[in-house]
DNA sequence: CTGTACTATTGATATACATCAATTTCACAA
DNA sequence: TTGTGAAATTGATGTATATCAATAGTACAG
């Protein structure tokens, strides 16, 4: 079905052609969708969607984004991180439930909402993929509810690192087999201490201190604020509260 | 399209025939689905789905359920409450991301997963309704992330009460117009203090104390642990952090 | 290189909520 | 009715994390 010469130029050269929702489309479907797409670039700090607005739909080709909710007095909670191949926006709903910001330079492959929804109605694979992403987001949100409601600060930091590790594994091997990974693993932290704090329901000071504690426990090394290496995944998992300490 | 005599007996007498996913089905679609359904009753405290299992799919006809996630050492976080007309379970996914318990006597209208998924593939209205419910769940989960990550205890209690109020409004008038409601409103609290605590990331003691504070502030009255009346929705909203205190 | 502004770390103290401990209230059985 | 156990409330104290404050590191402009 998928003969390379049928694939649109832009898609053939696209870094996420075989990932995310595009991975589920045949060449002709891809062509149809490509004709509706428009690439857009965003700068770090730029707001892409405002909470409550209709907003944009599209694929993240490259870059890091945060979705955040804000209270009347300015308190913020980051509810999701988006990376390349993630799908941005909620087709079917007219109200974005969070504001979306570019954290790094970001390239999106955007669609007009109505056209995208019409296309999705014709392409079962596409709507299934979008819904599957929404389902995965729900599972992550609930995992984070457990973190925010029950975990201690150091467990939150460890869980955050574990999530970065898993994300990296997904990208690398498309599966979640921890054993496929070296025991020592260097991670790039894609967001600032302030953003980590807003994601974990903590303050920047506590984030700093708990990173330090994990270092002192020998679980991680901190090269600099943006680069840490995980020495032992099992110990990181234990620190994250996924294993009973007394076992 | 919807002629009463075409509707299956069981559905015609069903309290949720015009709510939830069933509201989106025509008589013939309803018949098809009805032939696959099986009613099941559960007792308070009974576990219906275990986290990680394939679990059940179906409509909640009547009763209250909680979805909860558990840590290795026993800490728990309630991630969702389900009431009549809500849809239970995640078609498309084979792993329930939370354990589901009956809180009260519960009546479900269950389906075999594979048969339901096959039916959904034929009934666009059905799959759209199921996906719409997943989307709504995601929005609620993110709202709760904001609560768990940023709100103070009294704001959490007020937000919880507001959610019960909104739920009741939805049921009553199928819309979310706060103005349609009397300014004094009596609420039945469907879950125990322990469950409220596990839902809000607090302890039972703090839940009790903050209920008391809201009473002392004149925002609510407490008839007994299960019955409270809201004196002023605007003040409840302010207490929940939806309005800036200093404004 | 030097200054400037921002981000991160580290330290001292405060506080909101948890924990521990009694009562009190409620549901229900005998 | 009275008794029994669980659920809820109320009180006294502890503690994890926030807050306030200072210092150190980093990126970038000139």
Image (tube, coloured by chain):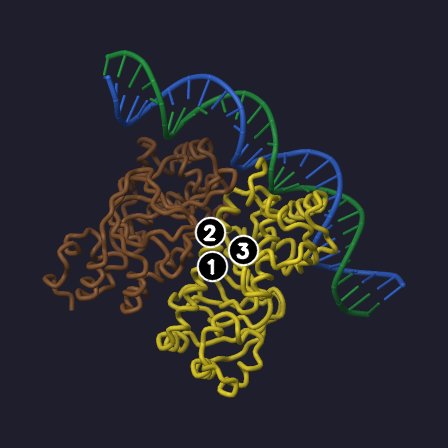
Chain colours: A brown, B yellow, C green, D blue
Q: Position of residue C18 (x, y in %)?
A: 60, 43
Q: Which residue is mark 1?
A: B137
In this picture, residue B169 sits left or right of residue A148? right
The location of residue C12, given as percent across then percent down, is: 54, 20
Disc 3 to disc 1, how far (Cα)? 13 Å
Chain for disc number 3: B
Marker count (numbered): 3
Can you identify the residue that label 2 sits on? B142
Q: Nearer the viewer, mark 3 or mark 1?
A: 1
In the rendered image, which quarter is residue A185 located in? top left
- Tag 3, which secondary structure? strand
Answer yes or no: are tags 3 and 2 on the same subunit: yes
Residue B25's mark? none
Kindly indicate the quadrant of the structure image that contains residue A4. Answer: bottom left
B106 vs A81, left or right, is right
Mark with earlier residue (3, 1): 3
Q: Position of residue B246 (x, y in %)?
A: 58, 35
Decide which of tag 3 and tag 2 comes sooner along the chain: 3
The structure residue drawn at horizontal position 52% and vertical position 60%, both measured from the top left corner, is: B67
Q: Which residue is mark 3?
A: B78
Residue drawn at x 32%, y 49% as measured from the top left: A167
Helix, strand or loop at mark 1: helix
């Amino acid at each position: 079905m998928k003969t390379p010469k049928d694939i649109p130029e832009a898609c053939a050269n696209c870094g996420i052609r075989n990932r995310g929702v595009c991975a589920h489309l045949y060449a002709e479907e891809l062509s149809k969708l490509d004709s509706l797409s428009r690439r857009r670039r965003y700068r770090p700090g730029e707001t892409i969607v405002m909470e409550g607005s209709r907003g944009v739909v599209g694929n993240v080709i490259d870059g890091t984004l945060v979705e955040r909710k804000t209270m009347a007095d300015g308190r913020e909670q980051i509810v999701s991180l988006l990376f390349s191949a993630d799908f941005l926006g909620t087709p079917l709903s007219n109200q974005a439930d969070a504001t979306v910001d570019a954290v790094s330079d970001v390239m999106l492959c955007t669609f007009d909402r109505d056209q995208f929804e019409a296309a999705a109605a014709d392409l079962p694979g596409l709507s299934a993929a979008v819904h599957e992403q929404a389902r995965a987001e729900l599972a992550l949100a609930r995992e984070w509810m457990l973190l925010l409601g029950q975990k201690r600060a150091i467990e939150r930091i460890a869980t955050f690192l574990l999530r970065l590790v898993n994300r990296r594994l997904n990208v690398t091997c498309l599966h979640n087999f921890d054993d496929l990974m070296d025991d020592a693993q260097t991670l790039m932290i894609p967001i600032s201490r302030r953003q980590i704090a807003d994601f974990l329901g903590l303050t920047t000071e506590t984030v700093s201190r708990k990173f330090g504690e994990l270092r002192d426990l020998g679980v991680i090394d901190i090269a600099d604020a943006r680069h840490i290496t995980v020495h032992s995944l099992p110990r990181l998992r234990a620190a994250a509260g996924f294993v009973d300490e007394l076992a």
